[in-house]
Image: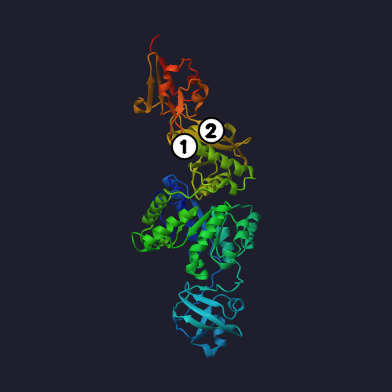
Amino acid sequence: MRRAKIVSTLGPASDTVETIAELIKAGLNVARVNMSHGTHEGHSKLIANIREASKKVGQEVAVLIDLQGPKIRVDKLDEPLELKKGETWVIGTSKEKENYPEYKNHFIPTIYENLVADCHDGARILFDDGLMVAKAIEKDRNVYKIEILVGGTLKSNKGINLPDCEVSAPAFTDKDREDLLFGLKENCDYIALSFVRKKEDILEVKHLMHSLKKNVPVISKIEKPQAVDNLESIMEATDIIMVARGDMGVELGNHLVPAVQKKIIRMCNEHHIPVITATQMLETMTENPTPTRAEASDVANAIWDGTDAVMLSGETAAGKYPVETVKMMNSIIIEAEREPKERPLLRHMDLSNVNASVMVAASMIAEKIHAKRILSVTESGNSCKKISQFRPKTPVLGVTSHIETVRRLSLYWGVTPFHLSDYNEDHFNFQKDIVDKVKEELKLVNGDKLVITRGDGKFFARGSSNSVKVEIVKDRPKAPGGGDVTQIAEDDDKTILLDTSICASCHNCIQICPHDIWKTSDDQQSNTMINEGKVKDCTMDNECIRVCPTGAIEIIPKHS
């Protein structure tokens, strides 16, 4: 079972119901809608296709609306500009060009009104994702003189980065506001905020949603140097972090990205905040059917670092092999998870929150008794989020009656959503409506164990997971025949049988027998076994049969 989740960007190569359905089957958990491209009408149709594909496959996925953020770009050019090393050019808004006839053939127009005001002498100005580099020399009225350090061909609408400047443009623009309102209307599951620099950028978005009585989790994209510097305070305000390595590489330098990525993932793990690693993870598969070995290692290393999810961008939005790319990422993750990352130590975790402490307890209990699943019954998904950050070895089922929560749980590491589609609050029975359904779905057998976390009082009371229960399956029909799963030991007077296929290894028999007829296996599983050397001491009082919860023990006298 794959624990880390896959986020895929949808676009022209993957926007049909049929393709999205294939992506979900291949391993897609979260569908990213990039608001930097397309129209609201087109995005609305895409989201409808995502929902339809989910129903077709029978698996809900989350919809992530990724806001564009402030874009500093080159304005429209009559023809590409040839920038040569050592040349002096000026940069400013297009309306200023006629005021500088002396720079008629060396004028770079920009759509960003505040570029000159934000810039300063000596600052770097990067064009087209850093392919061309210039240095600011001096301000000349309403334009800035720049020296070309690395030349190239500059085309219309190419991006401009100012890594050394405090950009005054807000992280949340007027376009972002319109796109956010659109996303909320479409009942999106996550909102990603681009070019976050400080926690106030996130709070502005949350305040707006609060005024609209909406509560959609915010993903903060870390791609600016200021965001790296302010990471601690940003984590106080955000719900999720995304390591957006594209613009981060341009702004910080590609040589610093690996170390920054590891730092961000480590801090997110320590603060129990989900983290997504993004950009160019399998870039080669945009054109080729297989990735490079370096790309496969990149994905695996992100998993080993502790990321909750990995993201595909152009590979699935515009690539030739979108479904194959998701299948490949799924395979890489599964292989990487065969060598699991060490779980955070208890002494490093804040367990002052009752809900968090219960989740940790449930995880530890499930691990020690070798439970098949942890059932985390939740309304908002917060309890699943907490247990996910503890990285339990036991798979988690996030049980909820809310379809919105089902979709959001799709992003949480190690959590599989389980939807109670026919939940009826007035006629709800915990055993019948949850436990029995899970037993049937997972094909559990007698002796299997479930660890269940839920709140007291009203079943789906928000944030009230404060109890842990161990459920031992003992009411499933026995499989025909015992065969090699039955242990048999005998002496002249009796035969003792232990059906290991249904034994719960609860050790009740060991505790109640004063004659040491029962013992635990020598391996780490601590399975119950018959102590053959002690069978002769059994008095056949059947106390071990009485305390066995699954009916796994039989004692048959040879002489009646």
- Which label sits on residue 500? none
Colour style of the rendered protein structure: rainbow
State the SS at label 2: strand
- Name the residue nearer the viewer: 156 or 366: 366
Question: Which sits in the foreground, 504 or 462?
Answer: 504
The 10 Å Cα crowd at callout 2, few under 14, some 14 to 19, many 20 or more, is some
Placement of 191 over or under 491, stated as above or below: below
Work out which residue is located at the far front of the displayed protein and give it.
533
Q: Residue placed at 54% from the left, 90% from the top? A: 101
Q: Is residue 462 visible?
A: no
Q: Is residue 13 above or below residue 167?
A: above
Distance of mark 2 from mark 1, alpha carbons?
A: 11 Å
Residue at 46% over, 24% down? 518
Can see residue 368?
yes
Q: Quadrant of residue 231?
A: bottom right
Residue 470 bears which disc, if any?
2
Q: Secondary structure at mark 1?
A: loop
Quadrant where the image shows the C terminus: top left
Residue kind at label 2, given as amino acid type: Val
Q: Quick check: 160 left or right of 321?
A: right
Q: Which residue is mark 1?
A: 372
Residue kind at label 1, given as amino acid type:
Lys
Q: Where is residue 398? Give x, y as percent.
A: 52, 42
* Figure quadrant of the N terminus: top left
| Foreground residue among 258 and 441 | 258
Residue 346 screen position, x and y as percent: 57, 45
